[in-house]
Image: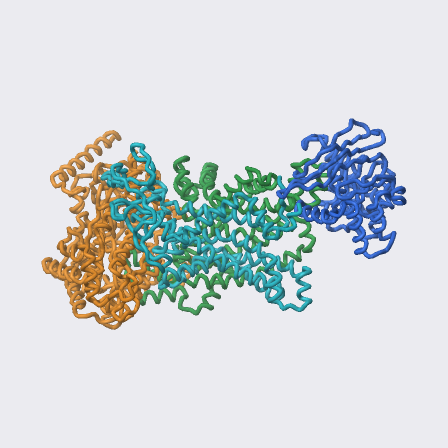
Chain colours: A orange, B cyan, C green, D blue
Amino acid sequence: MPEPLIAFTRSIMSKLALLLCILQSIFVYAADYPELWLEPARSAAQLGIATFTQSPFLEEQNLPPVAERLPDNPPVILPLDDIGTYGGTAYIIADDIPMFFSHEGLVTIAPDLKTILPNLAESFSYSDDGRELTLRLRAGLKWSDGHPLTAEDFLFTVNELQLNTEFLPVTFRDFVGVELRALDELTLVFSFENPNPFFVNYMAQSPDLFMLPKHYFQDFHPNYTDREVIGERMEEMGFSNWSAFIFTSMQQRRFPDLVNQPTMRAYKAESLTPGLFTYKRNPYYFKIDPAGQQLPYIDTIEAQDIRDNAVATGQASTGQLDFSGVRMQTSEIPLLKLGERNSGIKVSIWNRIHGSDLSIQANLNYADEKKRKLFEDVRFRRALSIAIDRDEMNEIIYFGRGTPRQVTVLPNSDYFEPEFASAYTQYDPAAANALLDEMGLIDVNEDGFREFADGSQLTFALEFVETETPKQVSMELVTSYWNAVGVDIRMRIIDRNLQYARAIAGEFEMTLWHADRTTDILFPINPDFWVPRKLAASLAHWSEWSRWYLTGGELGEEPPPNIRQLQAWADEMSTSMDPARRVQLGKQILAANAENVWTIGTIGMAPHPVVTSARLKNVVDTGFWGWDIRWTMPYHPATWYLAQ
Amino acid sequence: MSELNELTPGQLAWLRFRRHKLAMVAGGVLIIFYLFAIFCEFISPYTPDQRNARAINAPPMDIRFFDADGQFHPRPFVYGWELNINEDTWMREYQEDTSTRYDIQFFSRGEPYEFWGLIPTERHLFTVDSESEGYIHWFGTDSLGRDMFSRVLYGARVSLSIGILGVGLTLFLGVLLGGFAGYLGGVFDNVVQRITEVLQSIPTLPLWMALSAALPAAWSPLATYFGITIILSLFGWTTLARQVRGRFLAMREEDFVVAARLVGANDRRIIFRHMLPSFVSHIITTATLAVPAMILGETALSFLGIGLRAPVVSWGVLLQQAQNYQVIVMTPWLLLPGAFIVITVIAFNLLGDGLRDAADPYSSLSKT
Amino acid sequence: MKKYILRRVLGMVPTLAVISVLVFIVIQLPEGDIVTSTVGQLEATGVDMSDDRIESLRAQYYLDQPLPIQYLYWIGNFITGDMGFSYLYAQPVNELVWERLGYTLLISIGALLFTWLLALPIGIYSAVRQYSTADYAFTTVGLIGLATPNFLIALILMYLGYNWFGLSFGGLFSPEYINAPWSWARFTDLLAHLWIPVIVIGTSGMAITMRLMRANLLDELEKPYVTTARAKGVPPLKLLLKYPVRIAINPFISTIGLLLPTLISGEAIVAVVLNLPTTGPLLIQSLITQDMYLAGSLIMLLSVLTVIGMLLSDLLLAWVDPRIRYERT
Amino acid sequence: MSANNLVSINNLTVEFKTELGSVTALKDVSFDLPRNCITAVVGESGSGKSVTSNSIMRLLPDSAQTSGEIILYPQKSEPISITSLAEKDPRLRSLRGGLVSMVFQEPMTALSPVHRIGDQVAEAVLCHREVSKEAAWSEAASMLEQVGLTDVQQKMRMYPFEFSGGMRQRVIIAMALICHPQLLICDEPTTALDVTIQAEILVLIKSLQQKLQNSVLFITHDLGVVAQVADRVVVMYDGQVLEVGDVKQILKNPQHPYTCHLLASMPGAERRTTKESKQKNWAAGAALGGGTALATAEDGRQVREFVR
C-alpha cells in the first residue's frame, strides 16, 4: 500500500474509533470523567483498530515495529478531552512521580472509588465460594526491555519472594494463606484459605507487590544463582545480602539500579542524578488511544528532586512545572490561583480522600495507669471532640470548603451513614466542660487547667509528624480549643521515623495521623482506623490490642470484649461473600466507632489543589486525591499530553 | 586642657563612645527593644495566641488621625474592616469600612493576662474597645488571625533573652577555659587547645542538629528553651577562649602580674583580681558582638525545624512559619519578625563597634 | 620547612581521631536509628512491617553490635576509603558524595572569593577614609548582609531572580541543562544560577571581613615602616597596596581553613532552600533519617577537609609571610 | 641668605585638633639649615623636635594644622615652599626621598618585614628615577657597600628580621642616601642602638656627610651625640626654640638656663643620678615657664598620648 493511503486509512479508522467512543460516552456521561472509565477498557479488536502508530521519539532506535511491541490485542484508553499528540518533556518534582505515571497491575481502580477493572489481566473471576481468583493475562505483554511478561513473573514474585521466609521473615498480612499457581503461561489462579473477595482490591491498590521481572531478578535470587556469585554482586553494590537488594528495588525511588530494571509502567528510569531523575517512555507500554497511537503521549519526564516546599510552590505557581500535586497545600490555594491569573497555570481543586485530615488518637493502651484511665473513659474522648470548633477550623484553614466530620468513610461508600460523620462534631464547650467536671477533673489550683481528681498535675504530650495534611496549624487551633476547656496539651513535631517506632511500641501519649482507607477499595479489606488489627505509624491508640490480634494472643494485651467483637466483625466482613452482610458488618463497626470516638476527627474531604501547566491536557478538573486510589490511577495519566 | 586630668578611664571611654553616633543610636534601639521584651504583655494589645477569626492573614492596618472626610481627630483611630472571601481567587479581601470608626484607647481593658506571670491584670497600653466589634492589628495578622504586633513583642522576649543568656554561658566557658589555659599553660593549655581545634574543625550545623534532636520530647517549652540556649553556646566559646588565652599569655609576663606573684598572691587571686579586670572591656565588646550570632543561630535552628517550636513564640519560630513562597508574594507582613532580627543584629554590631573603640585606651580621640 | 610540614601532618592524626569519636557519638545521640527510619518510610508506602523484620534489618546494619564495635567497623572502613553504605539512598556513600562535594566546594570557594573581592577593597577604603560617609554606608550594607538570615535572603533572591531574570526556581542549572554534558552553554547556565547561592552565603561573611580588614589596616597604617616608605617617596596607592595592605591581608590567609566549617554550615541551609545538588541537603537529610554511615562519613569527610584546609592555609601563610617561614624552619 | 641656607623655617606653628580641644606642638618656630652642615636639634621628648622634622617631610597627620612657612632652596632649581605644597603636587613626591630623606629612630620596625632588603632599598631609586630594576639593584648594592655592609649581594636577598639593629640602621641610611638628597633628616637614629653601634653609626653619618657634601638635620635629646657630630645646634623646649648657635659656642657658653641644665644632665659631663638630673630639668622648666611649666609639660604628655 502506498504511504498516503496508509495514512488516510489510519486516520479514517482512528476517527471512526473515536466517534464510537464519543457516542458511547455522550449517552452515559455523568461525572467529571467519561463513564467509559468505569468499564473494562475496550480492546483494539473490539474497536476495530488494526494499525498502530508510535511516537517519533522511538524511531531510529532499532526497535521492533510498534505492532510487535504492543500486546496482541492492546486495551484502548479513552482520553478525557481529546486525542493527544506525541512528544515533549514534562517537568515535575520527584515526589510527584507516583502521581504522574501509575503502577500497572493485573487489575486497576475505577474513578467511582469502588469498581475494580482488569488491566494487565484481560479478565478475572472469583469462584463462588470466594476461595479462588482466576486471572487471565493479556497475550503478548512485554517488559520495557522487550522480554515477555508471563505468569512466571508473578509466580516468582509471590512464591519465591513474598512467601519466602528468607526474603520476608514474617509474611505480609494480606499474603497469609495465599497460594498462587499458573494454569498456563497466561492464566493465574490465587487460592485462599478463607474466602477473600477483596483480594482484587489489594492487588489493584498495591500492584508493585505482585510483579517483579523474573528474568532480571533471578540473577540475584539464590534459587537461580549461586550464592557466592550473588554475594560478590552484593559486595560490589554495597548490600549485605540479596534480600536487602530486592527489597530496596521494590521500594526505593532513588535506587540507582532502577535504571537497569525492566518495568511495565509507562516510563522507565533513564538516569538518577543527585538533583534530577529522568524518565523516558517505555517503548513496550501496552495501552493505546482510540486513534491507535501507543501511549503514553509524553516522551520524557524530568523530575527534580526538590526538598524545600517554598521552591516546589514557587515553581508550581509560576508555571515551571507541568504537574504538581503531592506538595501542594490547601493554604496555598490563593497563591496558586494568583499564579493561574499571572502565569497561565491551571489550578484544579480536588478533594482529599481523607475522611478527616486529622485522626487524633489518645493511647488507649498507654503505660501510665492514671492517664490510661482517662483515655479509656468515653466521656473524655467525647468531651475533647465536642470542644473543637470545627466550623471555625473550616473557615480559618479550609476557606470554608472542607467538611467537618469524624474519622469515617466517604459519603459515596456503601458503608456510609450520615451520623457516622456527624457524631459528636457539634461544638459545645459547655457540654464538654460538664463531661470533664463529671469525671472529676477539676481545676483545683485555679491555673486555668484541670488537674487529676487527686489534685496532681495533668498535662498531655501530643507528638506528631507534619506531613500531607495541615496538621500543625490544625493542632494550634485544637490546642487552643482544648485549653479553653481546661485541658493542658503540649504539642511537638517529630520526625517520621520516630512516629513509626513509637507508634508500634505504644509509647505515644497522644498523636495523630490523617485518615485514609475511607473508600470501598480499602475499607472492607483494611478497616484499620476503626479496628485494632494492624501496627502502623498511623495507628498509635491501640497498638497492644493489635499486637495481641496479630500474634494470636501471644504478645500484646488482650482487648476488652467490645474490641474483640470489633475484630471479629472486621474478620467476617473481609471474608463474607454476602454483600448485604458485609455492609451490615461494616456499618456496625463504623457505628461503634462513631459512638465511642476512639479517634477524633476534624475536617474531611478537604480541598486539595492540583496544578497543571497550560500545555498539559486531558487532566480531570476534579477528582479524589489520596492513597486508596494511588492518587491518579483511575484518571489515566498515560493519556496526558503536552499541547504544542 | 587641665580638665582631662580629672577624667576617670570610664569617663574617657564614655567620651569616646559618645563620638560614635551610630553606636549611640544602636544602643538606643536596643534599649527600646529590650523594654518591649520586658513589658511585652502590657505593650501588646492582644495575647500572642488570641485569634481573630474575622481577620485571617489581614494586612497591617492604618492608624489614622484624619477620617475619610479629611477631618482631624486628636485621638487616633482605625476603621473597621469588612471581610469577603473571593469565590474565584480564594483570597480573603479586606475592605476598610469608613462608616465604622474605632478610637484607640490607652491603658484600657483587653484580654486578661498575668504580668510576668505574677500580676493578673487586663490593662493594655493600647486597644480598641474590647466590647465593640473593632480590632486593631498594626502589623497585620497571621494565618490563624493572631496579632503580629503582639507576637513580635512576645517573640522579642524569647529571642533577645536567648542572645543574652547564651552569650553569658559562652563567656563563662570561654573565659574560664581560655583564662586557665593561658594562665596555667602546660598540659591544661594543651588539652583546651586540642578541644578548641577539634570543635573548630567540625561543621557546627550537624552538631547543633544532633544535639537538638536529642533533647527529650517530654521537656516543657521552658526546658527546651534552656536546652537550645546551652546547645548554641556550647560551640561558641572556642573563639572567645582563644582570644582570652592569647591575652593571658601576653599579660602573664607583664610587670603587675609578676609583681603580684612575687608578693605571693595565689593563682585564683591573680586571675580574678588582677588579670581579668584588665580586659573586661575587651570581653564586653566580644560579648556584644556575639549576641547576634546567638540570635541568628536560634533562627537557623528554627528554620530546620529543630529549634524552638510553637506554641513558644520567638522571632525564629515566627520566621519559620513565614518561610514559604506564599508569604513573600501574598502576606509579606509575616516577614516583619525578620526585619526585627535584622535591626537587632545590626544594632548589636554597631554597639559592639562603638564599645570596642571606647574601650581601647589607645584609640585616637583626634578628629579627622 | 619539610620538618615543619611533617610535624603538622602528624599532629593532625590525634585531632582527627578525637573528631571521629565525637562525630560518632554525635550521630548516635538522637532517638531512633536508620532501621526505624527505613521501616517508617516503607510503611508509608503501604508495606506491613513486623517486629521480627525490624530486628533482622537491625542485624543487617550491624546495629545489634556494641557501639565500640560499630565505631571501629565504621572508622576502619573510612580510613581505607570505604565510607560505607547509605541506606537512605541505597548507594555506597562514595558514589553519593563526590559530585556533590565538588559543587559544595565550588559554591563555598565562590562565596569566599566573592566576599574577599568585595569586602577587602571596601575594608581598605574604609580604613583609609575612616569615618567618611562611604565608610558608614559600606559598614551598614555589610551588616545588613550579616544580619539577614541566609534562608530569607535566599528565598527573596530566588523570587527576584525569577521575577527579574526569569531564572528557574532553585537548582544550579536550568532544567534542560541538569543532565546535559558539559558545554559552554551549560557552563554559562551554571554561572547564571551560581550567583544566587554565592551572594547569599557570601554576604553573611562580608561584614566581618570588611571590619577585620579595616581594623588590621588601621593598625598597619600606624607602623613606622609605612612612614619610612612614605618618606622614601613611594606613590600613595602603591605604598598602600605594597606595604600595609599586603601585611594586613595575612591574617585572612590563616583563617581560610577555619572558615570552611562556617561556610559549609551556611551552605547547607541555603542549599536546602535553593535546592542545590550539594552535600548540605544530603547532610541534613541523613542526620534527620539517622542514616548513620552517610551522616558520619560526610561530617568526617568535611572535618578532614577542614583540618587539611587549616594546614594548607598555614602553609600558604608561611609562603607569603617570610617571618613565619623563618620562625618555623 | 638663600645662597647659604638650604632650608629656612619661618614662624612655624603646628596645632593638633582633638575632640578635647587643640594642643599646640610648635609655637612660632624659626631657624635655618645652612648647606653642607650638620645641624642638631636638641630637646627632651615632647619638645617638638620630631614635629619640626616631620613638617619638613610633610609627614604630619591630617589632624595637624600648620601655619608659618618652610622654604627649601634646592641647589639647581627654584625654591619650594614646602608648607604650601598640595598633597598631590608632584614636587612633594620628588621632595620626599629625593631632595630630602629621612632616617628613623626605630630601625627594628622602620623596614617592612615582608619585603627583601634589596627590594626596599632599590625601590627608593625606582621611585625617583627612570631606571631598570637591575640598575636600581646594582645601585642599591653599591650604596649598601658604602654604608659598610659586606656580602651585599647575599644580604640584599635577606629580610629585615635577619639583621641586627645596627645593620638595619645602615640599610635605612643607605635607603635615605641612595637618591643623593640635599637634606638628610636623622630622627634620633641611634637612640635604639647599643652604645658601641651608636658610635659606629654616628661616625658613618658624619663621614658620609663629609663625602656627599649635603646638609643633615640631626634630631636628638643627647648633647653628647651633638658634641660628636653637629656643626650647629638648635635647642628646643615645649615647642619653642630657645637658642640657636654654633655647636662649640653653645656647649661652652650656653645662653639659656635650660641649655645649661641640659648640659649639666649629660652623663658624660657630670655623673649624677638620673632622678636628680630630671629634677633639675623640671626645675629649669619651672623657672622658664613661671611655675606652671611642670604641670603644662605633664598635661602635654597626656594629651599627646591620645593624639598619637
The answer to whether C122 appears left or right of C282 in the picture is: right
D285 and A250: which one is in front? Answer: D285
Q: Position of residue B217 (x, y in %)?
A: 36, 62
Q: Is residue C21 visible?
A: yes
**Residue drawn at x 19%, y 47% as measured from the top left:** A111
Determine which quarter of the picture holds residue A166.
Answer: bottom left
| Depth order, front residue of C117/D156 | C117
A60 in relation to B290, above or below: above
Instruction: Residue A391: give x, y in percent of width and height.
Output: 21, 50
Which residue sits furthest front?
Answer: D290
* D130 w.r.t. D289: above or below: above
| Residue displayed at 17% across by 42% down | A34
A365 and B48: which is toward the camera: B48
Locate the C terminus of chain B by quadrant: top right
Q: How many marks?
A: 0
Q: Is residue A265 visible?
A: no
Residue C12: where, in percent of width, then height?
58, 59
Q: Residue at x 78, y 44 (%)?
A: D237
Q: Residue furthest bottom?
A: A554
Rendered-image quadrant of the N terminus of chain B: top right
Name the residue furthest top: D78
Residue toward you, B255 or A113: B255
Q: Is residue D69 above or below residue A150?
A: above
Left or right of residue A606: residue C317? right
Residue B123 appears at what percent x and percent y?
33, 52
